[in-house]
């Protein structure tokens, strides 16, 4: 089974959805289901207009989008509490709005050179950098440092990001989302046949995966 997950590293529900999906696979393993499940992350940009190299506090971006700081803080507090229930630490007061194109290119590099498992580990580190550590994931040095922290060649990735490589792969992901009518993330596509939208509960993921494996 192959599961393709369209998501963005600055999407709170994508982090929550990843954690729940990981837990669902663990539940399957505990049930004795051993069929291999390859999980590949595909690029999606929630805010492709975010400036490169000019990070701003996330709360300011949410305030502009949702009609004021009070509403923005309500939304951020809610998602922070939901994340905490899934053992994820969100520090949205220090999170920095960033363009994620470099992160997505680096994730493609990790997939191409080291495979899906390593890509998923790198994806989690980038999300933690954004949601927990308050780092600018739109900065090439930060992306490379995150790569180094999960035993990837950060220097190689940093040099690669200075080239034009990887843009086409990201564009293909974005086109793939459009072809599948994916307009919100996370979206989980199983064997290019079944679509699970959103950060579903663990039980929902387990049920859909079991049905898909049966078929």
Image (cartoon, rainbow, N blue to C red):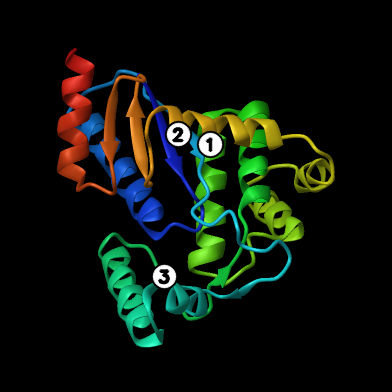
Farthest-out residue, bottom: 70
At 25% across and 39% down in the image, what residue appears? 24
Crowding around mark 2 (Cα neighbors within 10 Å: few <14, some 14 to 19, many 20+) is: many
Q: Which mark is residue 187?
A: none
Total labels: the figure holds 3
Q: Depth check: 93 or 101 in front?
A: 101
- CA–CA distance between discs 3 and 1? 27 Å
Whether residue 92 is visible: no
Crowding around mark 3 (Cα neighbors within 10 Å: few <14, some 14 to 19, many 20+) is: many
- CA–CA distance between discs 2 and 3? 27 Å
Q: Which residue is mark 3?
A: 90
Q: Which residue is mark 2?
A: 177
Residue 174 is left or right of residue 23, and the answer is: right
Q: Mark 2 falls on what kind of element?
A: helix
Relative to 155, say whether 71 is above or below: below
Q: Which mark is residue 174?
A: 1
Marks 3 and 1: which is nearer the front?
Answer: 1
């Amino acid at each position: 089974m192959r599961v393709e997950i369209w998501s963005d590293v600055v999407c709170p529900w994508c982090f929550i959805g990843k954690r729940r999906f990981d837990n669902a696979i663990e539940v399957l393993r505990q049930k004795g289901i051993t069929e291999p499940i390859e999980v590949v992350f595909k690029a999606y940009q929630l805010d492709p207009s975010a400036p490169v190299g000019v990070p701003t506090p996330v709360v300011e971006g949410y305030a502009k989008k949702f009609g004021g700081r009070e509403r923005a803080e309500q939304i951020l507090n809610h998602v922070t509490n939901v994340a905490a229930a899934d053992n994820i630490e969100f520090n949205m007061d220090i999170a920095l709005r960033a363009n994620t194109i470099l992160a997505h290119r680096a994730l493609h590099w990790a997939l191409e050179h080291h495979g899906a498992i390593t890509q998923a580990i790198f994806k989690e580190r980038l999300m933690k950098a954004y949601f927990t550590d308050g780092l600018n994931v739109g900065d090439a040095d930060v992306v490379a440092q995150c790569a180094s922290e999960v035993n990837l060649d950060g220097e190689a990735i940093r040099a690669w990001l200075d080239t034009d490589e990887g843009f086409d792969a990201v564009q293909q992901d974005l086109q793939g989302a459009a072809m599948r009518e994916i307009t919100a993330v996370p979206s989980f596509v199983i064997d290019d046949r079944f679509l699970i939208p959103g950060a579903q509960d663990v039980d929902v993921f387990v049920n859909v995966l079991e049905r898909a494996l049966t078929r």
